[in-house]
Amino acid sequence: MLGDPHKTAPGHAPHSPAGVGLGLSPVSRASVVDRAFAALRARILSGAFAPGSHLPTEATLTEALGVSRSTVREALNRLASARLIHIQHSGPKTVLDYRVHAGLEVVPALISDPDVPVDPNLVRAITEMRSVLAPDAARLAARRRTDPQAKQVFTAAEAVDPMADLDALAAESMAFWMTVVRASQNLAYQLAFNSLRVTYVATAGPFRRLIADELRARDRYLEVAQAIARGDAEAAETAARALVRLGDVPILAALENFETQPPGERP
């Protein structure tokens, strides 16, 4: 078969492709549990496995994915941990509505998984969340930062090089915001930032081009850092809002342009 380390009976004849009707196909050798989990997650997030419906049996999924039953069970347990399904002991596996039950950990898959159609409303929601989180994190950082944290924020701002390429600038920007969020000493913001960071990295190409002006705005980064250093919460919030707006405006404009195009003509 496909090298699943848990697969038994290597001499048995291969099964017929039972996954055709499910929209699933055998997964490759690398990270077999990860790939089985990702395949099932994509079917849930895309709506192919609708909320309230029951997943196919473990035996059916085992054959559809070309993996062992233990691999399928591990993937199902991960889906349950992500609150994408409910597993009833000795009963069916029920698909949950991720909008009601899941957390920010599903956002990267919703944005970057090629098997999950991108929802412009989700991109807009993430942009709106960023526009709220960043200024408030800067405000809190100005109030709560330690002296070492203030220095870290300023050092990260100074490291932004407007002449660098977008890949380097993106890394510098992420490093800056990481220091700001940590200095805010708000754990919920830190966890949310972690999810947004994964999403941003997963969709790096398109987003970097759209927010190029924000990435290159070294003076704006320094304004935020200086306000945090002197403990001026209002100035830090205002400067951070102005900085992220440089990226928010083109993202929202691109979304509006995307939504005005007929579905068949969208990129």
Image: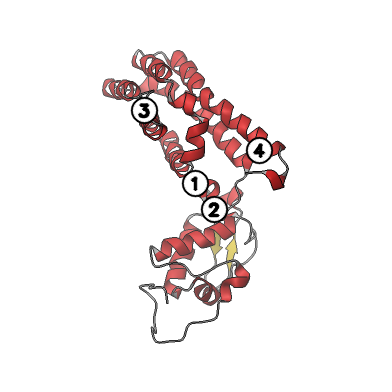
Q: CA distance from mark 3 to mark 4?
A: 29 Å
Q: CA distance from mark 3 to mark 2?
A: 30 Å
Residue 136 in sight from this viewpoint? no
Q: Amino acid at mark 2?
A: Pro
Q: Nearer the viewer, mark 4 or mark 1?
A: 4
Q: CA distance from mark 4 to mark 1?
A: 20 Å
Residue that label 3 marks: 164
Tell me the quarter of the picture where residue 175 sits.
top left
Q: Nearer the viewer, mark 3 or mark 1?
A: 3
Q: Earlier in the sequence, mark 3 or mark 4?
A: 3
Q: Amino acid at mark 1?
A: Pro
Q: Nearer the viewer, mark 3 or mark 2?
A: 3
Q: Amino acid at mark 4?
A: Phe
At 41% from the left and 33% from the top, the residue drawn is 170
Residue 104, compared with residue 52, is above or below; it is: above
Q: Earlier in the sequence, mark 3 or mark 2?
A: 2
Residue that label 2 marks: 114
Q: CA distance from mark 2 to mark 4?
A: 18 Å
Q: Earlier in the sequence, mark 3 or mark 1?
A: 1
Q: CA distance from mark 3 to mark 1?
A: 26 Å
In the picture, the quarter occupied by the C terminus is: top right
Identify the element where label 2 is drawn. Answer: loop
- Picture coordinates of residue 17 (x, y %)? 55, 76
Q: Nearer the viewer, mark 2 or mark 1?
A: 2
Residue that label 4 marks: 258
The answer to whether the residues at label 3 and label 1 have Cβ atoms under 8 Å apart is: no
Residue that label 1 marks: 108
Identify the element where label 1 is drawn. Answer: helix
Dot 2: few (<14), some (14–19), or many (≥20) neighbours within 10 Å? few
Q: Nearer the viewer, mark 3 or mark 4?
A: 3
